[in-house]
Amino acid sequence: MTATADRAASALERYEAVIGIEIHCQLRTVSKMFCSCSTQYDGAPPNTHTCPTCLGLPGALPVMNKAAVEHVIATGLAIEGQIPARTQWERKNYFYPDLPKGYQISQYAIPLAAHGRLPIETSAGPFVVDITRAHLEEDTAKLAHGEAPSANGYRTTLVDFNRSGAPLMEIVTEPCIRTAEQARRYAEELQLLLRAIGVSDADMERGQMRVEANVSLRPRGTEPFGTRVEVKNMNSFRAVERAIAYEVDRQAAALDAGEPLTMETRGWDDGRQATYHMRSKETSEDYRYFPEPDLPPLRVDQAWIDGIRARVPELPAARRARYAATGITPYDAAVIVADPGMTLAFEAISAAGPDLPAKEVANFVTGPHARLAKAAGLNGRGTAGASDPESIAAILAAIASGRVGRPIGRDLLDRHLADGTPAADLLATVASTISDEGALLAHIDAVIAANPRAAADFRAGKPVVGFFVGQVMRATGGAADASRVTELVRQRLGTEA
Ligand SMILES: [Zn+2]
């Protein structure tokens, strides 16, 4: 725990934090929200993915993107929200250089999804975040502010319209969150959910998922809300938790000292690990929302909703519960489900080896497989190495049955992951090293000679064959066929008797 987090925790003994989260997500669609420009503008030169509609030129007409609407409905269903039968588009009026129309097409009166919930796990136990609404809108252009003044003394700001008009979903929670950890866990779980249902890549570093928090404090046991501060520019989950903890600490110190807090927007400075004043919010903005005259109301019938519901895949929470029920730890289940690459591998290997102990598969996926994926820089975006699930399952089965010892088995896995050599070929090389019966008998005799008491136990009828087999497997580095060793051990001990 950092010093700030420590102080925030102690502040929470006197004050209750009231936290609401707003998250903007770029939706994964082929084209923009109201025109046919491509959304694949990452890395493209500025202003190359534009048309009269997303440049906001007069007279250009918007045409609704059905896939984006379906993404928000799918999200609404995944958070157990309500989808209205009829909704509408509204103009949110404000002036800013990244919005040449002077208004953003959004939803105000009737969001596409409302009254949802997202259960999360925290270090203090389970918690349910109540979600007020999820609505659809268009993104703005992107401003690039020049560093130095130009020759005429003005600072220049460049506008890139590639992002302008990209479909954006805004998800707003009730002010029901009470700790910085709950806020971070909520954002993490929402990202997992959005990725699982395929509606957004939700990469925070790339600005595809932007988290804002409204934070205020009130003395414990009181109802009225305190002065609210909006926190922006948190570019990672860790930043979300630290920025909120910082705000709780800062606001508690001000309240303790009798200093008034002001309504303001603050940014998070990751370098200084502190929030800073961006602008004051003395008055609430009046966006003069009114219905968008260029778009018809949006009707959502039950058949459409049912069709989308049928396509919503298993959600992360259900998947974690299913994995945990196979006998792996809840921790391993959470680690695997949090990483799409590990999830893919776990599913594929389990399918290829249905009789494999789940723990064996989980250990491989979170161990050698994860290390290789990390080294390859996959960051959860794919499965590692030139591996095929059938080969992995075959090697894991050979380990689980004792046919090859763990050290040899791990070596086989590494060799398979490195160059994709099929399991059959790898296991054949192991089998060929033990086919020399004379060498195997020498190992067995040595083990029996070194363990006279266990040998006596065997002759007294005690079940100690497994002990000898284990010793021989260890002595051969696992390069022996366990069932053949068992046979030979029985023979050897029997002949001596
Ligand atoms: Zn366009």
Image (cartoon, helix red, strand yellow):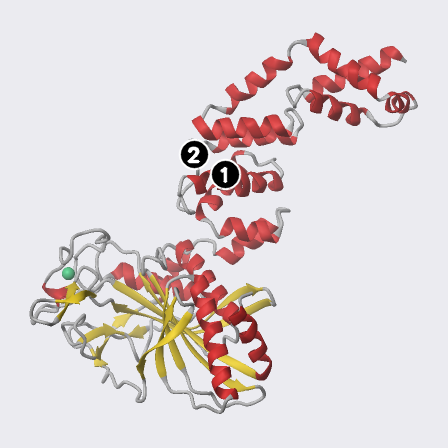
- Spot occupied by residue 108 in the image (x, y as percentages of width and height): 30, 78
Would residue 114 appear left or right of 136 to someone viewing this image? right
What is the crowding at mark 2: few (fewer than 14 residues within 10 Å), some, or many (at least 20)? some
- Spot occupied by residue 279 in the image (x, y as percentages of width and height): 30, 80
> Is ligand 1 less than 8 Å from the beta carbon at label 1?
no
Front residue of this view, candidates 447 and 312: 447
- Residue 145 can be seen, yes or no: yes
- Spot occupied by residue 342 in the image (x, y as percentages of width and height): 48, 44
Q: Which of pointers 1 and 2 lies earlier in the amino acid sequence?
A: 1
Would residue 61 appear left or right of 282 to someone viewing this image? left
- Number of labels in the image equals 2
Q: Residue at x 60, y 25 (%)?
A: 408
Instruction: Name the element at disc 2.
Output: loop
Q: Find the distance from the CA under tag 1 to the CA under tag 2.
A: 8 Å
- Whether 194 is drawn above or below 84: the answer is above
- Residue 190 can be seen, yes or no: no
Q: Amino acid at mark 1?
A: His
- Whether 155 is drawn above or below 216: the answer is above
What is the crowding at mark 1: few (fewer than 14 residues within 10 Å), some, or many (at least 20)? many
Q: Which residue is mark 2?
A: 385
Q: Amino acid at mark 2?
A: Gly
| C-beta proximity under 8 Å, tags 1 and 2 | yes
Q: Quadrant of residue 411?
A: top right
Q: Residue at x 27, y 56 (%)?
A: 29
Q: Residue at x 66, y 19 (%)?
A: 480
Query: Taking the image as four quarters, which one is ligand 1 found in?
Result: bottom left
Pick the quarter of the image with the N terminus. Answer: bottom right
Q: Which disc, if any, is residue 91?
A: none
Q: Residue at x 66, y 9 (%)?
A: 436
- Spot occupied by residue 305 in the image (x, y as percentages of width and height): 37, 63
Q: Which residue is mark 1?
A: 369
Instruction: Name the element at disc 1.
Output: helix
